[in-house]
Amino acid sequence: MANSFNHIGIGVGDIKRAVGFYEAAFGCRLLSQVFDVTADGPDGDEAVDVLSSRPFRSMRMANLVTIDGIGFELFQLIDPPHERREPALEYWKSGTFHFCLTAPDFDATLKRILDLGGKQISQIWQRDPRDPSKRMVYCSDPWGTVIEIYTHSFADTYENRG
């Protein structure tokens, strides 16, 4: 049975600014208002269970969606507080170290990321020596989440590549 990608969860230091960043940089759409989750609230048992490695008390959340239906859950931990990863790109550790979005207007998307407080981590690289239009770059949002940007879909970039 084939599965499809549903959503990604991203920790941020400022939920309202993060909503604005993901809306403006990538065209994400906010599905409902930013909301609070507390350990003793209606979703508290679930949050405490899922976030059990440290005593969870409260956070703010927002649910956004990309144009192709992929969800973005943004989390601003209040108690315990959000901590930024340093360095942001810990590629040598197991687990997810980045996510990638396809940007039809690659240059404009990179400019928006930078204008909104994100950072460019790598050079812009050509993905296919036969097709100079296929490019990628590593960036980060203002809170250090590593984001790779491609000009083409994953399948278009790698399928039938010799």
Image: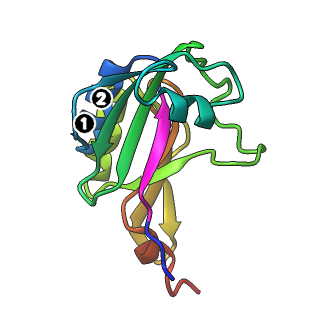
**The residue tagged with tag 2: helix, strand or loop?**
helix
- Left or right of 109: which side holds 48? right
* Residue 152 lies within the magenta run: no
Name the residue rendered at 47%, 53% in the picture.
100
Label 1 belongs to which residue?
Answer: 23
Identify the main secondary structure in magenta: strand
Residue segment shown in magenta? 5-11
Name the residue rendered at 49%, 18% in the picture.
40
Name the residue rendered at 35%, 55% in the picture.
70
Looking at the rendered structure, the kind of residue marked 2 is: Val
Vertically, is 20 above or below 91? above
* Residue 10 lies within the magenta run: yes
Label 2 belongs to which residue?
Answer: 19
Residues at marks 2 and 1 touching, judged by CB atoms closer than 8 Å: yes
Vertically, is 94 above or below 2? above
> Percent position (x, y) of residue 91?
71, 44
